[in-house]
Image (spheres, helix red, strand yellow):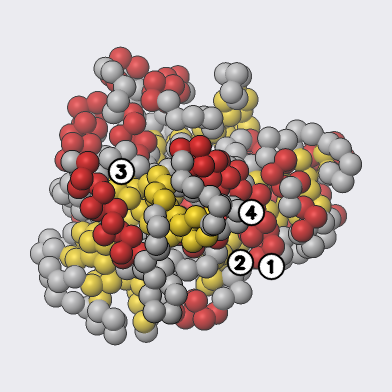
Amino acid sequence: MSGLLPRAASYEECYGGFEWRVPARFNIAAAVCDRHAATTPGATAVIYEASDGAVRTLSFGQLRGEANRLANLLTHLGARPGECVAIHLPQSLECAIAHVGVYKTGAIALPLFSLFGPEALEHRLADSAARILVTCSDNLPRLLEVRDRLGTLEHVIVTDAGGPGLIDWRAALARASDAFETRDTAADDPALLIYTSGTTGNPKGALHGHRVLIGHMPGVEFPHEFFPQAGDLFWTPADWAWAGGLLDVMLPALFHGRPVLAKRFAKFEPEAVFELMARHRVRNTFMPATALRMLRQAADPRRFGCSLRSIASGGEALGDDIIDWGRETFDLTINEFYGQTEVNLVVGNCAAVMSVKPGSMGRPVPGHVVAVVDGEGHEVGVGEEGNIAVLRPDPVMFLGYWKRPEATAAKFVGDWCLLGDLGRRDEDGYFWFKARDDDVIISSSYRIGPTEVEECLLRHPAVALAGVIGSRDPVRGEVVKAYLTLADGHAGSDALRDEIQGFVRQRLSAHEYPRQIRFIDEMPLTVSGKIRRVALRELDAAERAGKD
């Protein structure tokens, strides 16, 4: 049992001893399913725990059979290489089957967050021109609100229900053959489209090739202390629709033939999470910083008897207190990592081979060339601030933004892909985050574009102007904060604030609605009429200072 990274005694040995081996022909489904089904068909692939505590498992052999049935169904529905098949499912056996089945056909998997509201779904489905969607009865009502406006969506497969205009997953798969030849794809053929928020406009789709899985593996193995090892079992609270759940946990676990636990909590409750990890003997977890802060609130966490071997965290910086708490609670060092949907897991920590500096993102993950550069793509000196960038070619790097060649080109300066963050590199080669060079809000590790939230707020009849920023928060890192000027005939009140929050929550997502709303008489604008978010951040800082 070994990973792609060479086991080493030092960071320098690990980094210097790694070499990419990306085959010309590569398919994610063959790598995470078919090869294991051929050698160890009875080995457990996915463990699913339902809300009532019932547990179901799926072996690699069963995963291949069910994914083959789905691939045959998708082919019958006309799924073609290069077109998107949307997957709107929570962590579940069906979600794993759906991903493997889509990759088998050569189509592009489009994962959608389970908590997306109708407007968030509409934008992604319309922009991707997806013709086929796989969903479940819990998520179906939000789709039905906008289905009539989706001219390209032809087929909706529901995993646990049927009805007019819907395809019953169970009945359809029961009729399909469990034999299917996985499509022979090139490593650069498109496989995955994940939408990510930016400063302006609606979220853009980051398109990845099949090689993205190989590109992720060093960045998974490194912070998880040379994953895989005997007994390893992965779980994360992150939804499998995000890169953090799908590419950092679910697919890497299956790639190495290790089981992954699927469990979605309606609400993150620290004691229930501890009990889950102890009950299933979870050994490895990706745990966002917000989740770690919430876990820390549980009294006497050692009483649960968790047996974690590795914890990786990303999206927000951890402080000394969380690092110390992790050592006291789990007898291990929480390893931070860094990346983004377009170019993920490129900087990280591995306590087995290097000292961990709390607050630092770590050092370049083996296989990746990372630097701090100026606006012209020249590396800056030690300690100097600049743009954090990754050199291409790199197998983890995205193919480009979906249908947005100009945005793709703007992401690069020469061969450096700019990650949109400012930082510095110290004399030991550790990277330190300074600030984002845009207005993206990172709340509980979710990237939230202010424009999408502002556009939704402006649809409320009481709102005349809306400006959205991130406001510092001790638990979530940042929360979405909206400054609103109201239309004539409306006055600010607690009731209106609650109404507007519910309006956004229902239409976008539970993680995107403004947790804080301030009514202001005049919105700060530029001479061209654009909202001056810098002025709103100054106002927010003054408001927070007044509370201290």
Residue at disc 2, secondary structure:
strand
Instruction: Pinpoint residue 210: horizontal percent, then vertical percent.
Output: 56, 62
Query: Dots 2 and 1: beta carbons under 8 Å?
Result: yes
Q: Earlier in the sequence, mark 2 or mark 3?
A: 2
Q: What whole-number distance in Å separates the C-alpha atoms at marks 3 and 4?
A: 27 Å
Quarter of the figure with the N terminus: top left
Q: What whole-number distance in Å separates the C-alpha atoms at marks 2 and 4?
A: 26 Å
73 up-or-down from 297: above or below: below
Quarter of the figure with the C terminus: top left
Q: Quarter-wise, where is residue 163 in the image?
A: top right
Q: What whole-number distance in Å separates the C-alpha atoms at marks 3 and 1?
A: 41 Å
Foreground pick, 108 / 375: 375
Q: Which residue is mark 1?
A: 82
Q: Earlier in the sequence, mark 2 or mark 1?
A: 1
Crowd around label 3: few <14 · some 14–19 · many ≥20 (10 Å): few
Q: Residue at x 36, y 53 (%)?
A: 470
Q: Residue at x 46, y 41 (%)?
A: 493
Mark on residue 190? 2
Q: What whole-number distance in Å separates the C-alpha atoms at marks 1 and 4?
A: 25 Å
In this rendering, would 50 be left or right of 544?
A: right
Foreground pick, 524 / 47: 524
In this rendering, would 79 be left or right of 375?
A: right
Q: Which residue is mark 4?
A: 119
Q: What whole-number distance in Å separates the C-alpha atoms at marks 2 and 1?
A: 6 Å
Residue at disc 3, secondary structure:
strand
Kind of residue at badge 2 = Pro
Which of pointers 2 and 3 indicates the residue nearer the eye?
3
Foreground pick, 59 / 301: 301
Q: Earlier in the sequence, mark 2 or mark 4?
A: 4
